[in-house]
Image: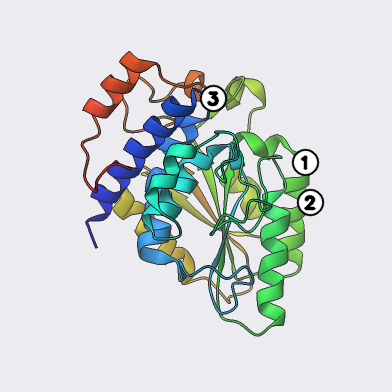
């Protein structure tokens, strides 16, 4: 397998090309979460590209912030779930690669439709409880945007998970401090997320280098050591929106717009082709 950093670079390259090709999509959060997806799918998670919807005896991943579908689709393709050439159909008519992941298209790797923010935590808890009831020792992973924690359903689910000791769940928050309307501390200040999750009864891991793929691997592996110990696990992952492309990095303005031809060329110049383009 190629080095994780090379995989992450190619996925970032895929992201900007996909969003440019569709003239639509969400590059900022996708780029910011690339190292997480790379660590999860190419190092940490027990999964099978020969896709089985039931995921019996496999780990499960739930994407809550479904608008970052470009990074999800690229990761799945690069991990062998479907042909990478299909990435060229992103957001096109009759494509299985919808702007937000959808199950009715039967795209391998997609187990829930997502993008209605705030719902993924509840889905992940349901999957984790199912695993426990079936006597499995597998893990459910989920990813959430910090901005989507404005949705109250999250906090009901977070409270539920601790009360019911859903200790086979590892939920990661992409703490990039940005959402569609601006910085999170101006839209709805989250204050100390770690203190919140701790008060709700979760095991909390702070990951300060969420755009360092090796640091993400280490945090996920650390989280796995708490599985089965009575608490759900939260990783609070500090990232930069748009990470890897200097003119996109750190700005909410790239939450949901596509690069033009000139911007694409500038982005690709910073992201060398490592695994081969689609």
**How many residues crowd around disc 1 within 10 Å: few (fewer than 14), some, or many (20 or more)?**
few
**Sequence-earlier tag: 3 or 1:** 1
Q: Position of residue 4 (x, y in %)?
A: 27, 54
Check whether the beta carbons of the residues at disc 3 and disc 1 lie within 8 A of each other.
no
Mark 3 — residue? 256
**How many residues crowd around disc 2 within 10 Å: few (fewer than 14), some, or many (20 or more)?**
few
**What is the C-alpha distance between the residues marked 3 and 2?**
28 Å
User: What residue occupies the far front of the structure in this picture?
Assistant: 94
The quadrant of the picture occupied by the C terminus is top left
Q: Quadrant of residue 20?
A: top left
Q: Which of the two residues, 150 or 3, is positioned nearer the viewer here?
A: 3
Q: Where is 191 relative to 249, above or below? A: below
Q: Is residue 214 left or right of residue 182?
A: left
**What is the C-alpha distance between the residues marked 3 and 1?**
23 Å
Residue 239 in view (yes/no): no
Q: Which of the two residues, 136 or 24, is positioned nearer the viewer here?
A: 24
Check whether the beta carbons of the residues at disc 1 and disc 2 lie within 8 A of each other.
yes
Q: Position of residue 89 (x, y in %)?
A: 48, 38
Which is in the foreground here, disc 3 or disc 2?
3
Q: Which mark is residue 67?
A: none
Colour mapping used in the image? rainbow
Name the element at disc 1: helix
Mark 1 — residue? 152
Residue at 66% from the left image edge and 55% from the top image edge: 112
Which is in the foreground here, disc 3 or disc 1?
3
Q: Position of residue 183 (x, y in %)?
A: 55, 22
Mark 2 — residue? 156
Check whether the beta carbons of the residues at disc 3 and disc 2 lie within 8 A of each other.
no
């Amino acid at each position: 397998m190629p080095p994780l950093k090379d995989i992450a670079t190619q996925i970032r390259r895929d992201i900007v090309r996909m969003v440019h090709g569709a003239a639509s999509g969400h590059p900022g959060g996708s780029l910011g979460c690339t190292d997480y997806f790379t660590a999860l799918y190419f190092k940490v998670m027990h999964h099978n590209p020969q896709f089985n919807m039931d995921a019996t005896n496999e780990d499960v991943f739930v994407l809550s912030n479904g608008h970052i579908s470009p990074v999800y689709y690229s990761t799945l393709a690069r991990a062998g779930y479907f042909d990478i050439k299909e990435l060229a159909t992103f957001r096109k008519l009759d494509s299985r690669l919808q702007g937000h992941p959808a199950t009715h298209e039967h795209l391998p790797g997609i187990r829930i439709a997502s993008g209605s923010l705030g719902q993924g935590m509840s889905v992940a808890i349901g999957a984790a409880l199912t695993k426990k009831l079936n006597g499995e020792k597998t893990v459910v992973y989920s990813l959430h945007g910090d901005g989507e924690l404005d949705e109250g359903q999250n906090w009901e689910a977070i409270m539920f998970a601790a009360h019911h000791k859903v200790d086979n769940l590892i939920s990661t928050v992409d703490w990039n401090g940005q959402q569609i309307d601006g910085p999170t501390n101006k839209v709805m200040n989250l204050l100390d997320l770690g203190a919140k999750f701790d008060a709700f009864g979760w095991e909390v891991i702070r990951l300060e280098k969420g755009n360092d793929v090796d640091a993400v691997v280490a945090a996920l592996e650390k989280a796995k050591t708490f599985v089965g110990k009575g608490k759900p696990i939260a990783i609070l992952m500090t990232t930069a929106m748009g990470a890897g492309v200097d003119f996109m990095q750190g700005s909410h303005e790239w939450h949901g717009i596509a690069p033009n031809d000139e911007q694409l060329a500038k982005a690709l110049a910073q992201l060398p082709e490592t695994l081969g383009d689609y």
